[in-house]
Image: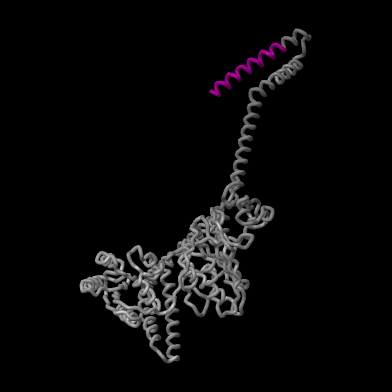
Amino acid sequence: MNSDKRTTQFVIAVVLVFVIEFLIMLLINYVFPPMPKLLESIVDASILVVTLYPILYILHIRPLQRLRADEQKKSDVMTQKLSAAIEQTADIVIITDKDGIIEYVNPTFEDVTGYKRKEIIGKMPSILKSGKHNIGFYENLWRTILSGEHYRDTFINMRKDGTLYYEEKTITPIKNEKGDVTHFISTGKDVTGRKKTEDELMKMDRLESLGLLAGGIAHDFNNILTAIIGNISIAKIDVKDERVFRLLGEAEKASLRAKDLTHQLLTFSKGGTPVKKLSSISKLVEESASFALRGSNIRCEFSIPDGIWPVEIDEGQINQVINNIVINAQQAMPSGGTIGIKCDNVTIGKKDNIPIQHREYVLITIVDTGIGISKEYIHKIFDPYFTTKQRGSGLGLATSYSIIRNHNGHITVDSKTGVGSAFYIYIPASPNAVIPEEYTREGVVMGKGRVLIMDDEMVIRDVASEMLKNVGYEVETAKDGEEAIELYKRAKDSDRPFDAVIMDLTIPGGMGGKDAIKELIELDPAAKVIVSSGYSNDPIVANFREYGFKGVVAKPYKIEEMSRTLSEVVKGTIVSS
């Protein structure tokens, strides 16, 4: 269609030129006398040029100018779009010359690195080096891009403030029409948040693997400790010699330290599930830190304002976290120093770049003035069994990490060698405002009545029997749930019923307390049953009433704990939860 139009325009132009020139020449010949042939040819050519130019301009030159203007306009629009895209993209963009000198960076680069454009133009990207990559890494980079190929990898770079960030980067050579590399363009994404999440998942996988082993070990170890601690506590009742009493006390303390170790092991297993209750973190933090530092040359400064939000926590586990971190800080300050502990209400959002749910938290900050942790080790300190100390299991901080994760919280650390360390613990705040009152009890409680003890371990049955006989009870034992139910039924039918039953929660290969309690309640709805378990943090232990139990005592236990719980259950005055 355009071709037909141009043909028509051309024909019209030819006709117009012919007509105009004919009329002008006719007029000249009519007005002026005859001219020489040469002059006539010159006049004729001049008339042709003057006549033809406007027509050529209208029909050809002006459309070409318009076309070029439209193309330039489109090019300008495209250039503006590309410029806006690079300026506004969420990706980090750097353009360098062929020698690596920076000619352009976009605003995202400024936001991520902290460097302003005017600070970075004329410099080389090596200003971002963190020291985390060896020379071979960069040699491979340059070899690839100088050959004209794309280079892709994850870079660990350093911001202006010295903090590290992870960048997934692609570097592309820009070539001229001859195929020579003239520039390089680097585009990248800040994947620090994702990398942290991946690291958290890997760390949790390692902890879960450890938990599979730890759970079984801790359960068996608690049974052994129950026998040891139980026998020691019984022996202390009857001993008269002060020296023997003191030695028994030291043995008991050592056993209780072993008990703490099993609690740490259980934290890595399913038995480490937090037994939560609504609590005030302020009082717990002060008491835990003060207790951990008793008798030391370390001063603790607290900054805990009123109005700190309540939290739903396992107080024993959070106490363990505070204790572990404070002791770690104490060991980092052998010549003494100051530990600062503060609590704050904080709201975590997307901009905070912390791999936890966006919501309200109580933030516990523990800062010491110790020797600090080197960059070489700081990313390993929450790994199981990692320690730089000659003494210690390497479980303290790994346990703390696992506990906080099981509370849906987060724990992180900043440290500078020679300056000190700061631990940040985020615990989800609770919308509830009621803080339950604490209840404390001490001493051995005497009693009377008939008690049935069910446990698959003979040593546990023996030590528990000896304990209860020492405080006034008549005792029978059963090795599993079936035998316990049979003995309970027989005693009830003979009018010599049991006043209470103490059941182990789990019996390998047999009926444990969780199943036996159902049949026992069907047999006697008024049965007073206490659950006992080496998995002291099992949710059943936390919610024992929901399963029909009247009380709970965690292994390993001392005679004081057992006698108090049993007395309260028999009398119906139990207040533990």
- 240 versus 305 height, above or below: below
How far across and how far down the image is residue 530, in percent? Answer: 34, 71
**Displayed quadrant of residue 102:** bottom right
How far across and how far down the image is residue 328, in percent? Answer: 54, 74
**Displayed quadrant of residue 147:** bottom right
**Displayed quadrant of residue 514:** bottom left
- 255 versus 128 height, above or below: below
Residue drawn 38% across the image and 88% down it: 238
Residue drawn 42% across the image and 73% down it: 263
How far across and how far down the image is residue 212, in percent? Answer: 38, 69
Q: Is residue 4 magenta?
A: yes
Instruction: Provide the residue span drawn in magenta.
Output: 1-24
Q: Viewer-proximal residue, 418 or 423?
A: 423
Does residue 224 show up?
Answer: no
Does residue 498 show up?
Answer: yes
Q: Is residue 488 left or right of residue 247?
A: left
Q: Viewer-proximal residue, 520 or 524?
A: 524
Q: Main secondary structure of the magenta part?
A: helix
Q: Is residue 546 left or right of residue 161?
A: left
Query: Where is the C terminus found, in terms of image quarters?
Result: bottom left
Total residue callouts: 0
Q: Viewer-proximal residue, 168 or 46?
A: 168
How far across and how far down the image is residue 50, in percent? Answer: 72, 20
Residue drawn 61% across the image and 78% down it: 336
Q: Residue furthest top?
A: 30
Asked which colour scheme the image uses, the reply is one colour
Q: Is residue 306 magenta?
A: no
Q: Is residue 81 left or right of residue 397?
A: right
